Image (cartoon, rainbow, N blue to C red):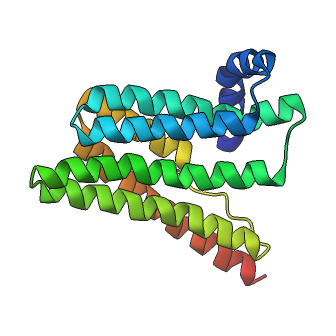
Amino acid sequence: MFPHMKQAAARYFSQPLVGLLARTGLHPNAVTVLGFLASGGAAWLLAQGSFFWGGVVVLLGSALDMVDGALARATGRVTPFGALLDSTLDRLAEALILGGLALHFSTRGDALGVFLTLAALISSFLVSYVRARAEALGLKGEVGLAARPERIIILSLGLLLGQVALALGAIAVLASSTAAWRLLYGWRQSRG
């Protein structure tokens, strides 16, 4: 039931933006690239220690990322390359954002901050990898609590509220749990 609620909420919040973007004629791949560029801007702000404004830009870039697929469907521009571009830039955006935080913490000599950021990055990548690999093997892989939208919300809230370490720790724990859940789910499916 939770995935259906999540999809309904995403549609409710994204439809006005999708309608606006569809009227502009902007290509969905351009929206994907704009979201990625926003993530680069967020990474720069975070590296400078501007957590609040970095969080705002992370949310803006994520809003674009949330609608690129819906825009492609609404305008009849769904392509395999668009899906590949979106997935690739999602991973790079997450690496840039967390890399900006790691750079900030490392220049301040904050070993715990660096550790938490790297733990969040590695576990986040595992979530995506286990799903992609499971699906490439013909298994279902979309289970767990910490897919990319949830991780972005947790990180953004942590940045906006000044609770960055707590957010990074939560992402590391939840994403690791999600990767393990997906792995176990794949194992159960493979046993027949």
Nearer to us in this view, 172 or 115:
115
Instruction: Please give left or right for residue 19 compared with residue 30 in the image.
Output: right
Say whether residue 155 is visible: yes
Instruction: Please give left or right for residue 84 compared with residue 94 in the image.
Output: right
In the current view of this chain or complex, which residue is farthest to the right? 76
Residue for point 68% across, 31% down: 67
In the current view of this chain or complex, which residue is farthest to the bottom? 191
Residue for point 50% across, 66% down: 126
Figure quadrant of the C terminus: bottom right
Residue for point 65% across, 41% down: 2
- Location of residue 135 by image quarter: bottom right
Figure quadrant of the N terminus: top right
Say whether residue 5 is visible: no
x%, y% of residue 54? 34, 32
Instruction: Please give left or right for residue 190 compared with residue 170 in the image.
Output: right
- Location of residue 175 by image quarter: bottom left
Tell me how many marks there are: 0
Please, is residue 90 above or below residue 41 in the view?
Answer: below
Instruction: Please give left or right for residue 163 compared with residue 2 in the image.
Output: left
Please, is residue 126 above or below residue 77 in the view?
Answer: below
x%, y% of residue 23? 80, 15
Residue for point 71% across, 15% down: 16
x%, y% of residue 40? 43, 41
x%, y% of residue 123? 43, 63
